[in-house]
Image: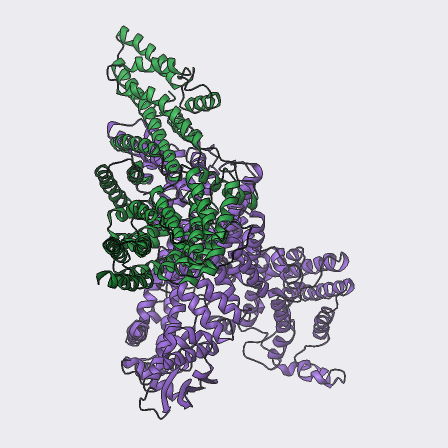
Chain colours: A purple, B green
Amino acid sequence: MGRTLAYKRRGNSAARSVHELGPIEDSIMFKDFAYLARGLRGFEDWMVYALALVVLALLPVKTRTADRGVSLALALLWASTALDAYRSNPGWAVLAGTEAALLLGIGSAWGRLRFEARTGFWAAAGTILTFYSLLLFPLLALFQAPLFDRSAFGAPLPLVLFTCGILFLTVEPIANLLLVLPLTWAFLGGPDGYRGPVELDGLEIALLAGALFLTLPPELRAMSDSRPSPGTAYKLAFRRRTAFGYGLWALTLATAFLFVTASRWRGLEQTTISLALLSALGLVLWLAYPAWQSLWYRYLAWGAAKAGGRIQIWLRENWRWGLMLLALLAVLASWNPASEGTSQQTPPSTTTAENGMIYSIPGKLRELLVGFLPPGKVVWSASAISLLWLLLEAYQGRRRLVIGDFEDKTGDSIVWASGLGSQLQNELARIADLYKVIDEARPTRKSDVVEVVPGVVDPGTILKEAISTTLGSAGFGTQIAALFTRLVSGPQLKGVVHKVGSDYVITASLSGGGLAFSWKVDSGTFGEDEKQNPADKDVPRALLGQLAYRIATDLVSIGSPRWRAVRCFTEGLRHYREIQRQSDQSYKLREAERCLIRALNDDLRFTQCHYNLGVVYRQLGELGSAESAFRRVLRENPDHFEACYALAETLVHCKKHEDAMRFCEAAIDIDPDDARAWDLWAYSLRHREQRLTGAEVALEPSHPGWTQIRERKEIAVALAWRALCREALRGPSPAIQSEMTTALLCTRNLAVVLTRLGLYQESQRVFQQATWLAPHDPYVGLYEGRTHFWTRSWRRAKSALGGAFDEGLAARDRGLLWSTLAQAHAASEPEAADLGSLRSAHQRFLDLVADASPADLRQVVEFSLEAPPRESHQ
Amino acid sequence: MSWGLGSGQDGAGYRDRLHRLCKFLLALKPEEEDGKEQSELARLQRSVNACRKRRRGADSDIQGLQDLQKALKHLERGRNGQKETEEQYLNRLLAWHPKVERIGAQVSDRQRALDRILQTLGIEDDGPVAALLALNDDLSLLERNGAAGASDARNRWKELVQELIGDWEWAYLQVLVRLARACLARNRLDPRLSACSQEAEQCLTEAIEKLERRGLFQPRTQGLYGLLAESILLRSKAEELPPEKRLELIQAAHTYARRAVEIDPESVDERRVLIEILSLLGDYEEVRTEAEVALNLDAGPEILRSIGASFKDQAASLRSPEIRKKVLQEAVDFFEKAKKHAESAPLDKACPLEQIETHGWAHYWLGLFEGERGSCDQADRHLRTAAELGFKPIESRVRLGWIYLEAKAYDKAGPAFRDAATEAKRWLAKHDEQAPGEDQPIEDLIFKAYLGAAFLALASPVEPISAGQAISAEPEKSIAKAEGYLKSTESLQNRTDLQSLLHEAHGRAHLARKEPEAAPELEKAVRLSPRSSAYCHLSYARLELSMAAGDDAEKCEILAKAREAYQLAVDLDPWGGLSSELSRLDSKLQLAEKPAAT
């Protein structure tokens, strides 16, 4: 709005009528473009437009000559602009002339530009900009669309936007050089006399898109034509994070400076806006990834995400968000006009009221809201919110299953069809619940790497929120929802029970909500499983169970279209779930294995079942079988990240580190945002290098492998924290615990790597963060204590180790705990009070070594009695 | 100072001390090949060989440990000799090594190993002992000059010597624990070696007391109380012990075993010992509870052996057939569950043969209890599985033969005895191998196989067993072979019972030929071991004698004795295994008694 006003105030001469156009409309050659022709000024415009069309025509031709032609045409366009600007704005003319010269030299004469990108983000962006500049903009200008007019120096198309669009199709790094001048043009906002709102918006878009293009390294831009190595974006972001951080900091400071001192610098308003936009872009990019490398940002983000999650949950309960919205509207509506008048009388301090370019944000917001919602509209707003709620319910209702009554046509004296609806609902809820609670399985903190856990699909609301119309105990809200669901005709299930001879048959049909299914279950066709299972002797229950699985198989994409496979798979999950809290796991795991294999017998391409079978084998310690199962998943579905990661993790346990690294790479390629694969890759690399160099415990700090190890560990930590905060933002859930374990393991591992590198100060800061995440984790305390011990901070070492208990630690780690604690006490010239602690730690160490097997003892000696590594330069 | 608490150089001195103690332990433990670079197959092969070695036992380990114990005892005395000053002790220590008293003539290799182990404790010319002595000289000089702080330094020096002595004592105690373990392992292989269990008991008693006094948790973490209970239990099984002494030992073992379970309730080994003791004490209800707990924890071969033996003892002690049937059913249910657990367990690469033994025990006991219940087919299936697993390959077959014999399935009993004898001869050919799981010596089992064949031949003389096979169809030949084994070997366990069986076989053979020697042979049998079948046949023999008696008075007297034997047979057959035989005998006796009475 501000720009429009300013534009009108300046009385731009460019607002000319289309009637001033020349006689081109009579031309036979262009009669099909009559309307277009009316928008062109004359021969010069036609030339310019024709050159642009030449560019467009040559783009699909994949030859060197065509590419040179494109560059030449672009150069001519810029040269034309330079000629137009020569008299009125020599500075802009020089800019345009230089760009023309560069295009001519680099693209046309030297032939270094290849416009080959055809797929991918930048190809799409380039195409959109090109078509907008060449077609949409002139047409809208032609039809006198509001605010649309000629571009700079009366050009019929926005040349900067057009050039950016064309250059986005290149893959060579030299294109960056050619983008500099158009972006400078856009940064400055173009010549003074041509700053129409559309022109300015176009320049800002070009500036943002071009800046993003320049920020990204060429190997990422060329995604469509040559596949970059897995995780290149994160690797590059990590390597360039310092430069990027400084650049962003400088940009933000400059913006703030110009913003505050805007009144002193006339004519720099557009530059300030451009800087602000670039800062915003930089901030978005920073928040997307590099920010997570910062310790402090992680603290802040975790706190904010937790608070945000809680607020979100709080608001979602009992329609509090609706009440809050109403309250806000009421406050805004009751905002008295006096304040409005005051604001009109007293301009805000942060505005440059004279040119109207920048307004104070609170004032603008108030103007918008008060203008939009006068006090009288509050009632209407409440009605609108209610309607919105009903619409939302209607939408959700279309995905909510309503189970109706079952009709009894058996003719038996016992009418057992009554209550079948609610029983079916229970069965469906039981299946859904099982899939939900499998989330209890989460990786352990005891392992060095994140362990795999079983995976299931989300059964969705259709099973979770199935409603039986005969169920009287449902809440009022549910009944209303059910009623409404019926009104909007969501899926409804009805059934009939028949008796054919001595066999019972249930037929059920589902309709509404865009779904149509029918099922028939017959006790006469029971398989061996149903006959053998003593729980299924009760025929109605058996029939109902079968019906529930059939419904679940058809309505939810569990992974197999065969209901018997789904039933066995579900039973396998049930057995797996039972082991979560039991000591004797192998028996139940075998049961789970049998069920899963039975499921695979019904459907060999059930990938999720293969995966979970692998997890079961992994837990049984049968790594060979687990490896086969995971490989089978990848054979069926090469995009299965979990299987790829699980395979890598299994290979790590088999000490096949090279293979593990290969699958980690593949996992990163599938999902570069998952921290686990990055962490595991670094772990594998470290152990591979250790084996190659024959290092007993760890590599030397000067080993070149540490660079890559550290880089990947840092990336893993950043990604793990990002995932954790995202999960926390959704509110409390079991998934948070899983993400927290991942974040804790990654952070702990990074701290250990930093210690090994001799970067003790950094390591201690990372340890502090891990401690903050899990204050009582013994492993964190243990390794933190060792770091302090190696830095000769005896007191801090004793403090860290004193809080760690050895219950649940492996023999190696227990040895480390007691030996380090005893050494810390011994090395610090123990006082009489400390002697007791020293002797106690000494005794526990002796107990441990006396109890250890020879292999464990050798490991304990190597690991726990290790001399400190040399301290690196920080 | 390299032996002290380790101030300076980042605690390097203290670290060295811990290194030395760990090295001592490493040298003490049996050498193991480094499996890092080996293939999976090689690792599995190594663990299988280690299992076999464990089964055979290693006497040399015990001797080496005994040598070490003696050597360390020599040092340990210095600790207790309060009159000896620290300086004297150190001097004696330095002078002692390497002049460790030589033990035996053929011990040069062992001696070298011993020296190497002792060297790890740091008695060298430039070791910590020498350093302490040199420091003592410096301190004495300072004390003579009256330097300030000399007394503090002297106190510190004394502390260091005490630390050194403490480490020596710890090393000595570790040797004691290891020696006790080795002795117990040896005793488990051969229960007759009661001296081993006695030595283990002494070592453990001393070690536990001293370790606890030093505040170490080793008795808890290593289950030393359980080992002590086991060693006492093994000692109580010595045949020469009087009953009251045996009871005393069992009670002591019970106390220690309870303590062991209390300390570590999740340890299966401790529960196994407790189960054995409870079984000996006849507290079968408690055995059942402990067995359930042990099975849920992690049942290994030893625990299954103990639990099975307990069920067997309980079944044998019951007189009521109904209760016995119930107990047998419980036993079958328990071992079915145990079998499922064993089948569910993933492969344990460290001890694969133990896993097979666990399977074997489950099948063996299932076969035995199914046989006792009369389910011959089930018994056959399980015992054959056990034998095919290579577990109790002879005893399983012998048991199977006897089960068939008792079930009167004579056509199957013969091949079972024949297989048992063939298998036994095969194992006898391998002189240094003990068949896995076999508690009884092979000679015992061969004897039982022949005896079984003899009974089979007596019960079913028409059963064709082809000539040239291990088992003959003629009872006399089998009896002769069994008798030959009985005379040739001195190692038979339960010799009295076996001799009684032999007499019964002889008696029945005579009875079959209606010879008057039958009664004396059967009388010998019942004198050695009163059993229902022997009494039954004794009654038959006396009945035959009564037929041949001259006058009525004598006839009546013999018939009265026959009736008495019959009554004893009935009393000793509470489960009715011989009921048909006994009712036939009863009717024959009644027939014979009527004319005699008239």
Residue closest to the eye, B174 or B588:
B588
Residue beneath the point at 35% across and 61% down: B373
Tell whether A307 sits left or right of A175: left
Residue B18, percent across and down? 38, 29
Tell whether B179 sits left or right of B260: right
Decide if residue A360 is in sight here.
Answer: no
Tell whether A268 sits left or right of A62: left
The picture quadrant where one finds residue A23 is bottom right
Residue closest to the eye, B570 or A72:
B570
From the viewer's perspective, is residue B321 above or below residue B523?
A: below
The picture quadrant where one finds residue A419 is bottom left
Most distant residue in the front direction:
B551
The picture quadrant where one finds residue B574 is bottom left
Residue beneath the point at 55% across and 46% down: B40
From the viewer's perspective, is residue B25 above or below residue B334?
A: above
Residue closest to the eye, A491 or A237:
A491
Residue B351, percent across and down? 46, 45
Decide if residue A774 is in sight here.
Answer: yes
From the viewer's perspective, is residue B536 above or below residue B41?
A: below
